[in-house]
Amino acid sequence: MPFKLVISDPETGRAIQYELDEAKTNALIGKRVGDVIEGDIIGLPGYKLKITGGSDSSGFPIRPDVHGSGKKKILIRGPPGFRPKRKGIARRKTVRGRELGPDIVQVNMRIEEKGSTPLEEFIMKTA
């Protein structure tokens, strides 16, 4: 299943959704949350993107502090995966590990370094 990328630009505050094909999706499998990747492998030459999170096909969020790529039930006190109503509350929740696998549907990324071509032009070419 191809990844849906949500690429956010911290300068403008905008986020763009971008769907990858199978070959580019396979290039991202095995990467971890926090890794900075070259935009060339996903069709955005000149860009550097940092993987910040995502979710799987069931909607479980990726947590950067959980090892592996499988689902795990962990005790958490805050986001991602749980937003407590009061301070000091903890819950046991199911989350996904930080490694990108084939069952991930959405990957969140942030632009670390911009290329020469605006991001909107790449999106228009593929749409």
Image: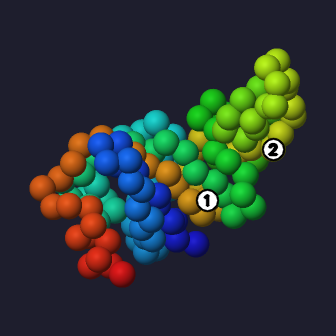
From the image, tell me which residue sits under label 2.
Answer: 94
Distance of label 1 from label 2 (alpha carbons): 15 Å
Residue drawn 24% across the image and 43% down it = 113
Q: Residue furthest left?
A: 116
Q: Is residue 117 left or right of residue 50?
A: left
Q: Is residue 4 left or right of residue 111?
A: right
Q: How would you rate the neighbour count of disc 1 (Cα within 10 Å): few for under 14, some for 14-19, many for 20 or more? A: many
45 versus 125 height, above or below: above
Residue drawn 56% across the image and 60% down it = 106
Q: Position of residue 6 (x, y in %)?
A: 47, 58
1 versus 100 height, above or below: below
Q: Position of residue 122 (x, y in %)?
A: 26, 70
Q: Residue furthest top?
A: 88
Q: Position of residue 8 (x, y in %)?
A: 40, 51
From the image, tell me which residue sits under label 1.
Answer: 104
Q: How would you rate the neighbour count of disc 2 (Cα within 10 Å): few for under 14, some for 14-19, many for 20 or more? A: some
Q: Is residue 91 left or right of residue 18?
A: right
CB atoms of marks 1 and 2 within 8 Å: no
Q: Secondary structure at mark 1?
A: strand
